[in-house]
Image (cartoon, grey):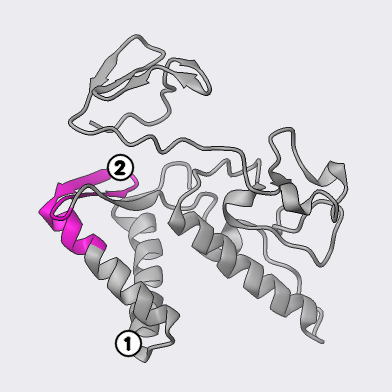
Amino acid sequence: RLALGVPIDGKYPDLMIDEKGCRLTTGERLQADKVYRCMGLMPATKWLKGSLPDAAFDNQGFLRVNHHLQVEGFKNVFAMGDCMIHKPSSELKLGHTAEVNAHLVVENLRRLESKQSKALLTYPTGVVHARRTPLIYCISLGKHSASLGFNWLVVNGLLAAIFKWMLEYTKVLACSESPVGIAFWKLADFMSLLIARTLIKTPDA
């Protein structure tokens, strides 16, 4: 079962997790065949400490960003992915959200460099045209199994594993600048946002 928004009991890093499952703060015990400890850790931003002022970091070491994903206090420094914290969205650190971050940062860099003085896009509306980014993930659970999630819809098993293989294969093609891979991901990005607005709607979007 999928339990969203319910914390695991205990105090980080001593959470109530073992090899067979975990206990939630509600007292409920979740049993599992396999447990993956995919817990958020401290961001690897120590190497930036000498280059940016302390005010640019929160108490966990994440870079503070504004609505344009600019590091607080800097016009030409942006942060995206696991190293930053965007308080208004409070998104999970997923591959999909990191990519959405990147799309916005790239477009805002173009706008900064433009001679037309275009206004910077705000996150996440400037990319997904909604107040929230869709919750999309696909996690391998062995050679022939995976878990695919799209907002409230979760698909487990072989079908999800095939989907995971397709995502990885086409992403490699796109990164190698293959026209097929690039076209696939342009269509995939468009369709995912369309589905999130119409069929499998993103909550509070």
Q: Which mark is residue 197?
A: none
Mark 2 and mark 1 residues within 8 Å of each other at the beta carbon: no
Query: Front-most of 7 and 59?
Result: 59
Marks counted in the figure total: 2
Task: Name the amino acid type tagged 1.
Answer: Val
Relative to 1, say whether 143 is above or below. Answer: below
Task: Name the amino acid type tagged 2.
Answer: Trp
Relative to 154, say whether 111 is above or below. Answer: below
Which quadrant of the figure contains the N terminus?
Answer: top left
Q: Which residues are magenta?
A: 143-164
Q: Mark 2 or mark 1: which is in front?
A: 1
Using the rendered image of the protein, determine whether residue 67 is visible from the camera's viewpoint: yes
Q: Secondary structure at mark 1?
A: helix
Q: Which residue is mark 2?
A: 152
Q: Name the residue furthest top.
A: 27
Relative to 118, say whether 31 is above or below. Answer: above
Query: Front-most of 182 and 176?
Result: 176
Q: What residue lies at 81% left-to-right and 51% top-to-bottom?
A: 72
Q: Which residue is mark 1?
A: 180
Q: What residue lies at 81% left-to-right and 46% top-to-bottom?
A: 56
The spot of residue 21 in percent (x, y) is 27, 23
